[in-house]
Image (tube, rainbow, N blue to C red):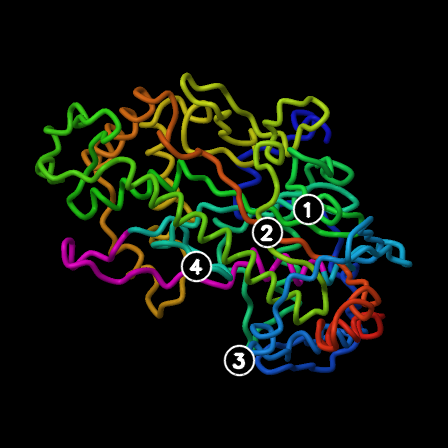
Amino acid sequence: MKNNKNNAVNRREMMGSLMLASGAALTELGFTKKGTALKKRGFTTLEGLENVPRGLSEAIKFPLIEALYGRRARRFSMGAEIADGVMKYKSKHKPEPLTRLQQMMVLTAATGNTGWHHMIYRNQKYAPHLANYAMAAGGRTFPSAAGFHTTEFFFTDDNGSYFLPTRDSGSLVKKEKGEFDLQHWLEAHEKRIVKLSDGRLNIPAKEPFMDGHNTWCVNAPGSTLLIPVADIAQHMLGSLCFLVQNGACIYDDTNNRKIPGMEKFKNLVDVENPYPLSYVEQMSLTEATAEMSTACYAGMLMLQATGLGGWMFDGLDRFSLLGASGDPQVPGLGFVSNKVENSPFPNITGLPGVFESYCPPHYKDMSEAVKALVKRKFGQDGPFNKNTAGPWKESSKVRSAAQFHSPEFQECVATMAQYIFDTFGKFPASVPAVYCLTYLQAHHLDLEFYDHFHQEGSYLYTHKNRKKWWAT
């Protein structure tokens, strides 16, 4: 992978609401914009589009129940080979990449913004103020604990490695008379893709870079590999805010001591009955992992509808993938890391200018990270900014009903966060600042492999008809 410093994207430009397209125009997704005939599939409209492949029409009307019951890990792609054993087989076909339309259908299923987050309406502790947990104004195809949304997405294919940010976008959905405009949705997401480097991400097909059972099939030629990455540091700050919002704080259960300076905030939090730090960090990691896993699951359901093979899995070494393999020939995505005393693991913190966790070195200290979090929540395009659009009849009134995090509130959160960083040399203390675990791969199946080894029914009718249905 190329050194990202040579093609880094300005962080403000990247994370803003306006983003330059790096991918193909929508016409290259398999559409042409001629004609005006209205095409509908349920509540999804493809108005004004010609040459829509049948595969897309079939995907739109594909029953959810069939996606659920028909979901299977289908690993054997065109061009694959199992060199030995009871399943020994070599594909007679060359690898075939996904079309841009197929790829966008999978990417948007896993990462897509689906409109405005409806928020959490009430908490008795600070009623009549609106519950102000959320950190994103938009909702996506997968759930997020309290609307934190700290996960973003990278992916790689034969042509390059890419970043597809959706967590801070406004609504990318366009509806006309209740009908979902798929053309607009795909186009809006396509414009957000940022190319990071040319060529497929180099993940050596051997241990320790990936589990031994994945060496023959993961990141194979022709495949698209989706890599969700969560900012656990930011999620942990959100959890600390959640505690303070509910009158609670933490203590250092590793060293069995209270956080110095918390007595100052006893009017905000119960300093006599704090939560264990390790509990809150475990909760934060688990909640973020749920985001990444459900995103991949949503994408996997789309594989069934579009007739694509693939599966969700966790058999990649995350250090190698992100950029901390220790091997200069395997730079991964190029995330930066540092060594923390008494820790066997590199502390990966982010990809400068692209995906930066809410902790040093990307912020001067944890107080600055807290201010950045408050800006995300209450600043321009944030969920509690009165000027942010929304799903309500009086969106400005609803959004402005949330209570702002006062300077005292921010100082309370920052005091706990800075103690963690100073004591443990990193933030969070016991879990990674940046984390990835679950991945999704999409590829074209070699049906002959399944016909050779499996009983009838090992793949769906969408797989059987994939080639002819997606021809344009």
Give the Cα separation between the discs numbered 1 and 3. Answer: 47 Å
Of tags 3 and 4, which is closer to the observer?
A: 4
* Disc 2: which residue: 313
SS state under label 2: strand
SS state under label 3: loop
Which badge, 3 or 4, comes first in the chain's sequence?
Answer: 4
- Point out the stretch of residues depicted in magenta: 103-132
* Disc 4: which residue: 143
Find residue 123 and report its image quarter.
bottom left
- Badge 1 local density, few (<14 within 10 Å), some, or many (20+)? some
Task: Choose between 54 and 166: the one closer to the eye.
Answer: 54
* Image spot of residue 297 (x, y percent): 55, 60
SS state under label 4: loop
Give the Cα separation between the discs numbered 3 and 4. Answer: 26 Å
- Badge 2 local density, few (<14 within 10 Å), some, or many (20+)? some
* Disc 3: which residue: 177
Of tags 1 and 2, which is closer to the observer?
A: 1
Which badge, 1 or 2, comes first in the chain's sequence?
Answer: 1
Of tags 2 and 3, which is closer to the observer?
A: 2
Give the Cα separation between the discs numbered 1 and 4. Answer: 28 Å
Which badge, 1 or 4, comes first in the chain's sequence?
Answer: 4
Identify the amino acid type marked 2: Phe
